[in-house]
Image: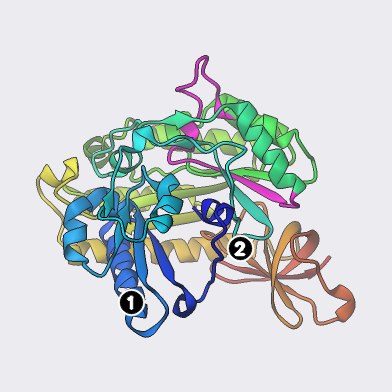
Amino acid sequence: MLGQIAEDGFPVTGDPSQADVIIVNTCGFIESAAQESVDEILSLAEFKKSGHCRRLIVTGCLPERYREALAGSLPEVDMFLGTGAYQQIAEALHRPNSNTRCLLPSPDGLPLQHCGTGRTLTTASFAYLKVSEGCDRHCTYCIIPKLRGKLRSRTPEDVAMEARKLISMNFKEIVIIGQDTGAYGRDLRPPVPLSRLLADVADISKDIRVRFLYGSPDTTDETLIRTVADHDNICVYFDIPMQHAAPLVLKRMGRNYNAGDLLRLVEHIRSVIPDAALRTTMMVGFPGETDKDFNELMKFAETVRFDHLGAFIYSDADDLPSHRLSNHVPKKIAKERHHALMSAQAGWSEGKNQKYIGRTFRVLVEEQVEEGLYAGRTWFQAPEVDGIVYIDAQDRKNAFRVSEFADIRITDALEYDLRGVTA
């Protein structure tokens, strides 16, 4: 959307008090995200009274999910664009007096972005590279297929061309993403595995690193693991949302594996790549989750000791199949389970970080926090979701260049972050 706005000659400001048009891109995946989006919309609507704002536009998953009902509850908003309408953002800006408040075409009809699609990137050292849209799974708790449509993959040739463009712009890390990245290419004819795509991008330049996020247990296969192992510049980092470990909960979720399958996958990854970093996402409070089920989840997490683990509380809504399941867990109990899991993970994470003290890692320097202090990431730290490395550089001779790699020796460890100096 920023790319289209720029191509149409509209200047962009980060100061909402100076904006003639404010655009709020929203998430509607879980209740807390939807509420955060609504709060932000109402907050920014105040600039229609106190600032330059004449139009407030809301885009993304919130209008796609709640549609005209959302428009009726937010009269402050001038126009709503669903997930199938982002390419119409410039048109929405050109038609300030349009009588149409809601643009909600099917996400399945949205043209895939391609290497020639204009983009305005808001990151300095790394760039997200979306390789597919949509998801064909039928997990009972998930609204994403409805919001983003069916799986549609870009061709590997087109992805590689965009990767070359990003590398020529001096981005040092390419982050491959999709709603279901591991399923990339299954819809192409002939099918193209994610492993081939990763290898194609990694082979463009040995001076950058490649990361992929949002896999799944059933798509993390032998070929993918071996491809990661065989390429020095693909991060040995596996993001595999597992959701749970108790068999009855997994079955109710619509997940086609069990704890034994997950443990075998983890053991295999670690046997092929001993230093591999593992990230997962777990859900607590799913309908029917008993104390026994939760204890199985805790035992599983303690056994695996993930490098990174995020958890969220089941978010109910009447447009989810899981809404119709019996024995919903009280919110108070779900919150207690969430706290227990994340408290345990904080301890496991700090224990892993302690083992890094004294070791040297190649760190991508991403910002100067203050005089003599920088921040960056190693290969086992994904942007925005994992910890970072704080780099002490009190000596002016040790100043770093942002968006460049540096060898850093780790000197201290916190729960999620690390601290280091020039090696």
Magenta-drawn stretch, dominant element (helix, strand or loop): loop
In this picture, which residue range is highlighted in magenta? 169-194
24 or 288: nearer the viewer: 24
> Where in the figure is residue 276, as x and y percent of width and height?
62, 44
For label 1, the crowd category at 10 Å Cα-Cα, with few meaning under 14, some 14 to 19 and many 20 or more, is: few
Looking at marks 1 and 2 on the same chain, the residue that comes earlier in the sequence is marked by 1
**As rendered, which of 218 and 42 lies closer to the eye?**
42
Three-letter residue code for mark 2: Asn
Query: Which amino acid type corresponds to the residue marked 1 in the rendered image?
Result: Ser
* Vertical placement of residue 177 versus 227, above or below: below
- Name the residue nearer the viewer: 215 or 61: 61
Note whether residue 28 is visible.
Answer: no
Residue positioned most to the right: 397
Name the residue carrying label 1: 43
- Judging from the image, what secondary structure is the residue with disc 2 in? helix
- Which image quarter: residue 416? bottom right
- Report if residue 185 lies within the magenta region: yes
Residue 159, x across and y down, in percent = 61, 34
Q: Is residue 405 above or below residue 196?
A: below
Q: Position of residue 300 (x, y in %)?
A: 39, 47
Quick one: SS at disc 1?
Answer: helix
